[in-house]
Image (cartoon, grey):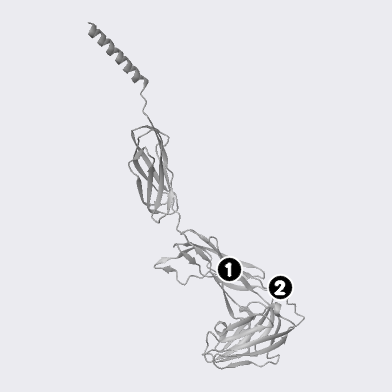
């Protein structure tokens, strides 16, 4: 039996975070009685006075003063039953049975004390708080004060590389946690998944790559960072799930931490179409018609299911089609359209261009200008007409004279 107890003690030692006990003393050793609150929804308080050893330097980095409170309850556990603790003139801390480490009706909770409130002579005000279902609370005098050199995990944060991404854009996510303590500690970090990953069969986001979970040791003063990336699939405000971290404290109890919940605003992706017009730079005769090719290219990263290109010609220019309709044009794909243009006056006539997408967004596209000029009469035609008139005159002179 002794050998079994020894093996269990060894197992507990190696499964907990490494620590050095600088000072530890129970209130039973100090001669205090347990504090009992008996009755529904009552609060019974008492004061425990204790001396803090003056040879222990509280300013030492990595030294953590803890109050370990031990509570017994009956007959049933409730969410509102527990205890309140106040050290000297510091803030009141409340602990609830639901958050404590319990074995049946016996519970423990470790409370980090404010170093600035610890004096050589101290007063700890402790109140047992019952409820309608937990009608008996005993704050046991086995509770104790201690100071320890130990791991201390803090700064647990999840950050995103882009708070205003577009739908489908890859986002890098970083999870960091720091061990500010004086000893190394083992910890498991998980990115966690949302409670509901789908809304009406639509996946909110895809996890693309990176670490989903990490278990290892973080040295004193070191920070661990894990990264992964996601791609949002819906246009909406999305609250990303918090990351979780779990470890065993120096007493062998499992502790869990949660990070923040990053918020991202996902906007609709910008769809891009570019246009190019054929026969740019050519000159046409006024009144003549010419065919012009218009090439529409999807220069964006998303397919364009439906879009309309509106052509706006200046006065003096007529075109056969004022609207071009785009359907199912994938990234990098193009469509070619042919229109007929006719200039009714000379000059450069511009064609404006505007795109309307199915989602209501609009964009201005590259238009063009077409030059028209009056048709010139060639000098040879003038000469031929001149000689024709001279010949006709000579003919008429000889005809009428004869």
Residue at 59% in and 83% down: 95
Q: Nearer the viewer, residue 15 or 389?
A: 389
Image height of 371 relative to 35, above or below: above
Quarter placement of the N terminus: bottom right
Closer-to-camera residue (13/262): 262
- Name the element at disc 2: loop
Residue 379 in percent (x, y) is at 37, 20
Q: Quadrant of the C terminus?
A: top left
322 shown above or below 289: below
For disc 2, the neighbor class at 10 Å (few under 14, some 14 to 19, many from 20) is few
Residue 7 place in picture, x, y as percent: 62, 84
What is the x, y in percent for residue 177? 60, 69
Left or right: residue 97 compared with residue 144:
left
* Residue underneath mark 1: 157
Q: Which residue lies most toward the right here? A: 55
Q: How far is the residue under mark 1 from the one under mark 2?
A: 23 Å
Identify the residue under disc 2: 61
Look at the numbered disc 1 and give the secondary structure of its residue.
Answer: strand
Can you name the residue that lies furthest to the top here?
A: 402
Residue 96 percent location from the top left of the image: 57, 84
């Amino acid at each position: 039996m002794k050998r079994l107890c020894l093996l269990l003690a060894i197992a507990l030692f190696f499964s907990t975070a490494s620590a050095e006990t600088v000072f530890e003393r129970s209130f039973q050793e100090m001669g205090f009685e347990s504090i009992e609150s008996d009755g529904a929804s009552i609060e019974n308080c008492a004061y425990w006075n204790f001396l803090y050893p003056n040879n222990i330097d509280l300013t030492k980095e990595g030294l953590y003063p803890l109050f370990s409170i031990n509570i017994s309850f009956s007959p049933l556990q409730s969410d509102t039953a527990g205890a309140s603790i106040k050290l000297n003139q510091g803030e009141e801390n409340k602990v609830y049975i639901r958050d404590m480490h319990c074995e049946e009706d016996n519970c423990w909770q470790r409370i980090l004390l404010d170093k600035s409130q610890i004096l050589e002579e101290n007063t700890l005000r402790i109140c047992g708080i019952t409820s309608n279902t937990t009608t008996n609370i005993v704050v046991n005098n086995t509770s104790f004060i201690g100071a320890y050199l130990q791991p201390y995990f803090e700064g647990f944060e999840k950050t995103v590389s882009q708070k205003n991404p577009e739908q489908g854009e890859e986002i890098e996510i970083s999870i960091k946690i720091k061990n500010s303590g004086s000893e190394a500690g083992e910890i498991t970090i998980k990115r966690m998944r949302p409670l509901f990953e789908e809304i009406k069969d639509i996946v909110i986001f895809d996890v693309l790559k990176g670490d989903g979970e990490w278990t290892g040791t973080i040295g004193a003063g070191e920070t661990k960072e894990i990264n992964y990336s996601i791609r949002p699939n819906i246009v909406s405000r999305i609250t990303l799930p918090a990351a979780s971290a779990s470890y065993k404290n120096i007493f062998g109890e499992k502790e869990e931490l949660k990070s923040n919940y990053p918020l991202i605003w996902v906007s609709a992706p910008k769809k891009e179409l570019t246009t190019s017009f054929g026969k740019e730079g050519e000159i046409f005769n006024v009144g003549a018609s010419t065919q012009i090719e218009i090439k529409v290219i999807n220069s964006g990263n998303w397919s364009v299911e439906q879009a309309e290109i509106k052509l706006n010609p200046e006065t003096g220019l007529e075109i056969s089609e004022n609207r071009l309709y785009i359907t199912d044009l994938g990234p990098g794909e193009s469509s070619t359209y042919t229109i007929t243009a006719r200039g009714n006056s000379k000059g450069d006539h511009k064609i404006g261009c505007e795109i309307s997408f199915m989602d209501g967004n609009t964009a201005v596209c590259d238009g063009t200008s077409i030059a028209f000029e009056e048709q010139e009469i060639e000098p040879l035609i003038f000469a031929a007409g001149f000689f024709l008139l001279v010949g006709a005159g000579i003919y008429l002179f000889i005809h009428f004279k004869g």
